[in-house]
Amino acid sequence: MLTIFLILIVLAMILLAIVKFDIHPFLALFGGAILYGLLSGMSPKLILQSISDGFGGVLGSVGLLIILGVMLGTFLEKTGGAIVIAEKILSWIGKKAVNLTMMLGGYILSIPVFGDSTIIMMNPIAKSLALKSNRSYAGTMIALSLGAMCSHSLVPPTPGPIATAGILGADLGQMIFFGFIVSLLTLIPGYIFVNKFVSKIPLTPKLSTSEESLNRKHYPTAFRSFLPIILPLVLIILASVANYPTKPLGEGSWIKVIEFIGAPVIALLIGAILSFTLPHKFDKKMLSSSGWVGEALLIAAPVIFITGSGAVFGKMLQNSGIGDMISSGMKEANWGIFLPFLIAFTLKTAQGSTTVAMITTASIVAPLLGPLGLDSETMKVLTALSCGAGAVAISHANDSGFWVVTQLSGMTIKQGNQSHSLGTLIMGTAAILIIYVISLIVG
């Protein structure tokens, strides 16, 4: 009981440090981990070992994945490939279903690109479609933001899901497969909410005469824009299928080739290299420390460090023996899958960052997988997705995404809470219910 009390105290101090004193999550999590180790009576040697094993172990498995994923997204964003993808989706679905177009566009773009960046990049399209179709700008904007937040939390290679899968030891191929299933089904209640309620919010877009017209002449083709995203995902899923115990793809030397190029780090490396072909005129400075690669590394660094400090916290919890304190009866309780959701939901609502909520939750839950009955390969994947479902909601005034949506669209804070914030709550709740149903079927 004392250990659980200590965890709650340390978590409260971490949240206070991040929210109240604006301390970087890396320092807050790392300091909180050491504080917990000292207060729980762990030996100095075990504390140091937990730091080394936690930080080094996780970064060895997910650090490169985060860097390569962000690098791919940066090149898509800088070359206009992301806009090409969005407009291609628009041509497939049609301008009549503008909300569906924006939701799916935001969903697909946020797989390689950060959610906030996706909203900023696609805002001109959301604004234009609202004007041309005489629809509420609130509808197109919230459809975009909810689509972006859904894949940002549930589908690798976005940094949050990659880091969470790494901490929990979840298979990335299965994570992609189930992540697509859960997230696409989650879009349904989000779409209904946007169409039935958000679209009734009166909001007219205002086009600024100072906005620069995009130079589309040098944009890559749709095929070249999609390829760096689709190919790595296909390779990772193929390798995951090839590794099944039943060997559904057979055996032989070509299977070893699939397993190699389908290893997440190699697959994402291939995707990153393909993204280097997107610029109309390649400049070697793009690969320099001051170029696009350098910019991508600056974006990835905080995520990597937060992931590492979260892993230290998780290893500290694990080495303190907290897993033994969980009742063995919980192994048979199906509601065990709800625990990661509730923790992530609380952390997201309290401090705003989806990535921090996912990583912190995964670090807390990792030592408890066995006692909670979540230690099978499939349940590890669903646990990671449960972390993502909780981290979808609630996005409100302490989340940068909330301000991106309201400031770009001109919504009031009240309108933002009624649309964006409530929408994330609906989608997060829908996601965990879908995950729970899947756990009953395949768990």
Image (tube, rainbow, N blue to C red):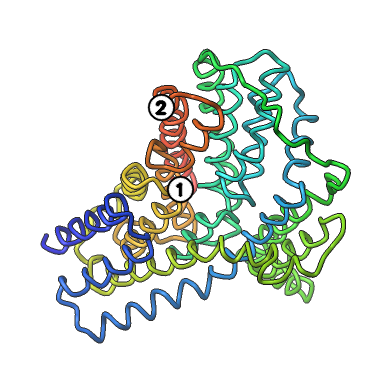
Q: In the image, residue 157 lies at what x, y percent?
A: 60, 56
Label annotation for residue 250: none
Q: Position of residue 64 (x, y in %)?
A: 59, 70
- The part of the image, by quadrant, that contains residue 217 is top right
Q: Left or right: 253 with respect to 334?
A: right
Q: Are marks 1 and 2 in contact (CB under 8 Å)?
A: no
Residue 5, image x, y percentages: 14, 58
Of residues 289 and 339, the one nearer the viewer is: 289
Q: Earlier in the sequence, mark 1 or mark 2?
A: 1
Considering only vertical position in the picture, is 59 above or below 249? below
Is 120 displayed left or right of 89 in the figure?
Answer: left
Q: Residues within 10 Å of mark 1 (few under 14, many from 20)?
A: many
Instruction: Check the image and report above or below for 19 versus 423.
Output: below
At 58% from the left and 42% from the top, the residue drawn is 181
**Is residue 216 toward the left or the right of residue 345 in the image?**
right
Please name the amino acid that badge 2 sits on: Ile
Location of residue 126 by image quarter: top right
Q: Which residue is mark 2?
A: 413
Disc 1 to disc 2, C-alpha distance: 25 Å
Location of mark 1 (residue): 388
